Amino acid sequence: MKSVASNDLFMNMKPYIGMISLQFGYAGMNIITKISLNGGMSHYVLVVYRHAIATAVIAPFAFFFERKAQPKITFPVFMQIFVLALLGPVIDQNLYYAGLKLTSPTFSCAMSNMLPALTFVMAIIFRMEKVDIKKVISQAKVVGTVITVAGAMLMTLYKGPLVEMAWSKHRQSGTTTTTTSAGAETSDRDWFIGCVLLIIATLAWASLFILQKAALKTYSNHQLSLTSMVCGVGTIQAVAVTLVMEHDTSAWSIGWDMNLLAAAYAGIVTSSISYYVQGLVMKTKGPVFATAFSPLMMIIVAVMGSFILAEKIYLGGVIGAAIIVVGLYAVLWGKYKEENLNTELEQIPEAIKNTNTTNNSTQLNGNKQLMVEVKSASVAIDLPLSKSNQLNNV
């Protein structure tokens, strides 16, 4: 019994473990990509290499494990894949990388925390989520989304006093000052453009989740194939965009350096693995659940950024992170209660069906028993009569 209960617990925890693990993967991508972009790598070329590597990694698995009973690629299905690739590799990632280059990893992640709110609104529009404001469950999801966005905005707009970390006290003040002044100079010139690019990228990301949920209806048993096709089509689209936007041929050169690490890491972890894992999660939990974990990425990036990039952590960031955790908990609580309620509602008709079946069978058994009793009675009555007739005849 204990082993069965532990297996059930693990199965229930798998979506949570998967999405939390993805946030660590996304956080690492932000740090490594920021270093690569600061080193001069073109974000257009990075997107091309990222999805080329992702396609090369995921396509063999799709071929060996899912080559049987492949869904037919009709024109509507092809358009879904085409738009998924356009939203992901071309629009979302190019604009996100451009915004990341103009701002900072922590700020980019803070802006990405609008993702649950945008996905929640779009899910309501496309009737993937139901909201009854009179119910506590819906109130928790709505309020939790608002709190999450408020915490992200607090981190963005309010800095407050500097919070000294134990690992950052012994850094050289000269290096920190130079980095800070350079970042301030960049933010004064391009901060607004970076914010706009990040907002558009987040909107494209939310649209990707909504459309991927629809595409999973066709590829419910072939998610590796869907991932490989999205990455493959996205690579072709990214090449076309790069040829138009990047005229310097030397930008395509890549060696055994941070640029290669950024492309390989992004391709393997945050494209192939993340697309597949979030597809598995959305298949059972929906797009709102999958995006509700994105605020954790900002907290992870803030800590990793202070370690690796010497980013300063301010009191506003700490308070905002705490608020985000509260909002995230409210959304997840609402989703958890909603799933339990839906499960109970699904079990009610089955219980009624079983009850009716039991009653019917009992009634039938009763009727059969009555018929047998009647037949037995008739036999018991007929036999004596036949005997008396015989006696009279005698």
Image (cartoon, rainbow, N blue to C red):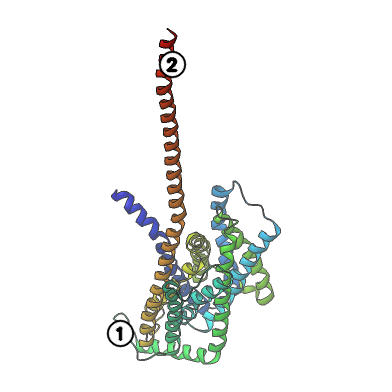
- In the picture of the structure, the residue carrying the numbered disc 2 is 386
State the residue position of label 1: 169
Q: In which quarter of the image is residue 96?
A: bottom right
Amino acid at circle 2 = Ser
* Rendered location of residue 349, percent (x, y): 47, 54
Q: Which residue is drawn at 45% across and 89% down?
A: 157
Counting residues from the start of the chain, the first of labels 2 and 1 encountered is 1
Q: Quarter of the image for the C terminus: give it.
A: top left
Identify which residue, 7 or 258, lies in the foreground.
Answer: 7
Q: Residue 235, how many percent across, how many down?
A: 62, 65
* Residue most extreme to the front: 392
Asked whether, in this view, residue 291 is left or right of residue 75, the answer is: left
Q: In which quarter of the image is residue 327?
A: bottom left
In the image, is residue 270 above or below residue 363? below
Residue 247 seen in render: no
Residue closest to the eye, 333 or 223: 333
Q: Within 10 angstroms of label 1, few (less than 14), some, or many (20 or more) residues?
A: few
Tag 2 secondary structure: helix
Q: Position of residue 144 (x, y in %)?
A: 43, 77
